[in-house]
Image: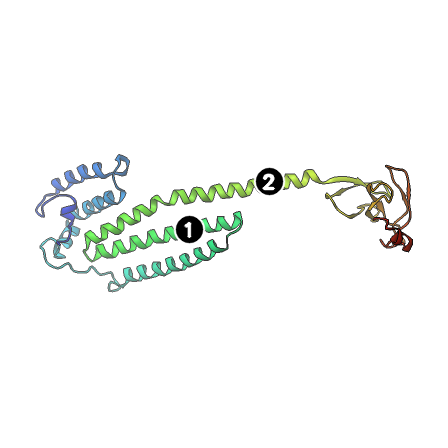
Amino acid sequence: MAETTLYDILELSPTAGLDEIKAAYRRLSTQVHPDRGGSGALFRLVREAYEILSDDNLRAEYDRSGINSGGPPRRARSADGGSGLDNDVKTLAERTSVLNQSLLRLEAAATSDHDRLEVYRVQLELQMAQIAWNMAVFRQLRAQGQWEAAARFHIKANEGERSLPPIEKLIASTEIQIAEKARATQATDSSSVRMIPCSLCGVRNRVSPNAQSFSCGICKNKNLMLSCQTCGTQAYECKALSGNAATYVCETCHRENPERRNGERRKTERRKGVPD
């Protein structure tokens, strides 16, 4: 199968003049432009064909490559002997492989919103690396004069670009979700904190729900959560300076609760099965 040439892309003969090249470019660029429902990859090919054929020096070099005359295409070489493009392709291929392995590990271990956010970010980075690889292969094939094969990789790169916005939306929505959950948690925590007066000095202290004790910010004495042995009502009572829980009167049943030493029950209480 004959190679597709730049003249074929613009639907021109090799003897076409500059005016014909300009007219063909205006006509085809309008037809294949993405804004008019065309392909971005084809539009770029048409533009690149025009940029080469409309320049006398570039066109002459292209014609000397042998593609137009039907001979075997010669590989275009860079200043370093043509190895630059090959190195780019190799480096990008290695980068893509590393990102793909990282993505597999992250997907297997993802359990939280933060984990999924990292997965989406690596997916975006991987997709961008694949686009760059396709473009590097496209440039290499174009330099070799393999225009038809180069066009296929150009199309793949264009398809990859269309996949970026959905991934970016996933990242943005996940970041919003994480931020909203953090704000909700913060609001819940702040609303559930209670102001409890110290049973020794009466100063009110911020106490978290279900806290079994708290130290007063003023008198530094420790308030213990105790249950009335008669009615079971729970209340914070201050620990005496000696280290023992003070005897206190329940505000509900107005019964006096016996003193507890270091939080331990007396032997008589254990025998009677009196609850804490």
Residue 190 at x, y percent in the picture: 68, 40
Depth order, front residue of 23/213: 213
Per the image, the residue denoted by label 2 is: 183
For the residue labelled by badge 1, is the local secondary structure a helix, a strand or a loop? helix
Please name the residue shown 32% across and 55% down the image: 133
Above/below status of 69 relative to 253: below
Q: Which mark sits nearer the N-terminus, 2 or 1?
A: 1
Horizontal placement of 133 versus 114: left or right?
A: left
Which numbered dot is residue 207? Answer: none
- Quarter of the image holding residue 79? bottom left
For the residue labelled by badge 2, is the local secondary structure a helix, a strand or a loop? helix
Task: Check disc 2: other Cα within 10 Å, few if <14, some if 14-19, many if 20+.
Answer: few
Please name the residue shown 39% across and 42% down the image: 165
Task: Check disc 1: other Cα within 10 Å, few if <14, some if 14-19, many if 20+.
Answer: many
Residue 54 at x, y percent in the picture: 16, 45
Horizontal placement of 166 versus 188: left or right?
A: left
Which numbered dot is residue 123? Answer: 1
Residue 255 at x, y percent in the picture: 91, 40
Depth order, front residue of 270/128: 270
Please name the residue shown 11% across and 44% down the image: 12
Horizontal placement of 177 versus 217: left or right?
A: left
Residue type for callout 2: Arg
Single out the residue that lies furthest toward the top. Answer: 36
Depth order, front residue of 223/64: 223
Q: Pick the quarter of the image with the N terminus.
A: bottom left
Residue type for callout 1: Gln
Query: Mark 2 to mark 1: distance in Å?
Result: 27 Å
Q: Are marks 2 and 1 in contact (CB under 8 Å)?
A: no
